[in-house]
Image (spheres, grey):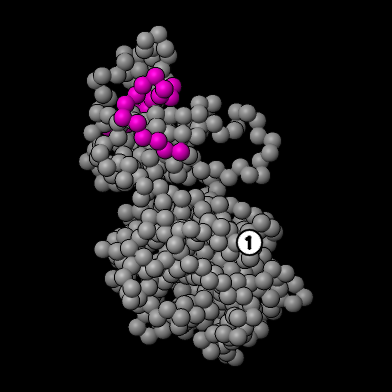
Amino acid sequence: MKIEFHDSLDAESPRIVARIVDQDKLPADLPRAVAEGAKASRFTGKAGQVFDGFHEADGNVVRLALVGAGKKKDAGRLAALEKAGAALTAKYLTSGEKALAIDFSDSGLSAEDAAAVLMGARLRSWRWDTYRTRLRDEQKRTLKTIDAVGAPDGTQAAWEDARAVATGVEFTRELVAEPANVIYPQSFVERCQERLKGTGAEIQVLDEDEMRTLGMGALLGVGQGSRRDSKLLVIKWMGGNAGDKPTVFVGKGVTFDTGGISLKPGAGMEDMKWDMGGAGAVAGAMLALAGRKAKANIIGVCGLVENMPDGNAQRPGDVVTSMSGQTIEVINTDAEGRLVLCDALTWAQREFKPDTVVDLATLTGAMMIALGHEHGGVFSNDDALADNLLAAGKTSGDKLWRFPLAPEYDKLIDSPIADMKNVGPRWAGSITAAQYLQRFIEDGVNWAHCDIAGMVWADKPGATWDKGATGYGVRLIDRFVRDTVES
Ligand code: BES
Ligand code: MN
Ligand code: ZN
């Protein structure tokens, strides 16, 4: 979606003009047909409500859309404005119209408000139609441009910044939406290399031989049943002060999770193409941060593997040695995400000596049972870090909810043969997974783990996404970096 800025409506303006309306505050200057039509259809200006009106001006028919922004004083005003922008693109995306003007003059919105409307419009317009070669005309996307008309001073600058974030969200969605025959460790890396070229971010890739030399037996064990080589992808954006320790984000990038020899049931297994959603979020966030030239030193590390059953696959009961030296009894080859993350975490801590490490992973089905699709779960060894992430979640809309860590949970993963096993008992499955990861966190490191299993994919459209890949995590990371690292 292209966003263009214009001072005022003129003969060249699109045929659809939209106005943002506060709840129960229908503007007094509306053409009579639109005002009465809106009232008759019970349009009140609730956030995201759209009225599609028509009226005649100078002999031409103008399509005048009203979109609700909710009540002005509501907390969550920016979210409501995003929803308004999103509702417009959702409504007109396949309408046949190629362009839409949003008339901000007399809207009373600030630059930040207007940028939020544009952000919602842009995010909601994303679709991945690459493989749909037989779409009927009425299913095809037509809306390509939004003219922001009469936007308040500063909107363009605010949009420049927001656009970088939108681009990051879209990149994450693309990585998540692509099937596993297209996105596997090597092609994930290549797509990041293409997308990040020229942004100033630096990329490093570790192959299997290098990881073997480093002793990453846990990560390599997961990938050993796959024809695709595992990779560790590192993206560095050093936009902060030289010498400031970097903040590190680590993502689970299982490009397909069959469960391995502990094979998953067939029904719904196709969902496991998005088991790289944590790595996808990290990659998209790095693109966003580089795109907006964040004043922070941030490193993204993606553990990329494919988990397949095979004659060479690891077996339940195998004992593997992680880079940390700790040994793991692999009770269940389907609890592979933690095996990948533990080596990625160890490597990242030793390589970069960060104070703060945050991992994101579609780690457990249990997290979806607990929180559904409304929050990701966050676990942390540091209250301030947890609070900062929770706050970033609230502000960005990528919401989180905190879960506990405790020695009583930790002992549930002790093993009779190795230092630990990779699964605990049935109960508290998300917590024992987090306890497992915590065993790889080195002294003095502030760490948080975000289990985002319920968030990266949506079966129905949400406020700023269609069904499918949501791009969850990019705005969370971006907001955390703005508010905690950059300030
Ligand atoms: N990738 C899955 C978790 C998952 C399941 C994410 C459904 C999104 C939707 C993970 O690798 C997994 O298989 N976890 C197991 C752990 C169990 C074997 C202890 C699970 O949650 O069932
Ligand atoms: Mn699994
Ligand atoms: Zn998995």
Q: Which of these two is toward me, 301 or 451?
A: 301
Residue 149 coordinates in the image, percent (x, y): 34, 30
Q: Is residue 414 visible?
A: no
Where is 106 relative to 333, above or below?
A: above
Seen at 32% across and 18% down, the residue is 35
Residue 473 coordinates in the image, percent (x, y): 44, 58
Mark 1 CB within 8 Å of ligand 3: no
Where is 432 relative to 105, above or below?
A: below
Q: Where are the magenta residues, as a range?
A: 2-24
Q: Which residue position holds label 1? A: 187
Residue 151 coordinates in the image, percent (x, y): 30, 35
Seen at 53% across and 89% down, the residue is 325
Query: In screen coordinates, is 228 left or right of 469?
Result: right
Q: Which of these two is toward me, 285 or 408?
A: 285
Confirm whether the magenta stretch covers residue 61.
no
* Amino acid type, label 1: Ser
Q: Residues within 10 Å of mark 1 (few under 14, many from 20)?
A: some
Seen at 37% across and 27% down, the residue is 18
Query: In screen coordinates, is 156 left or right of 91?
Result: left
Disc 1 is placed on an element classified as helix
Of all residues, the one furthest to the right in this rendering is: 311
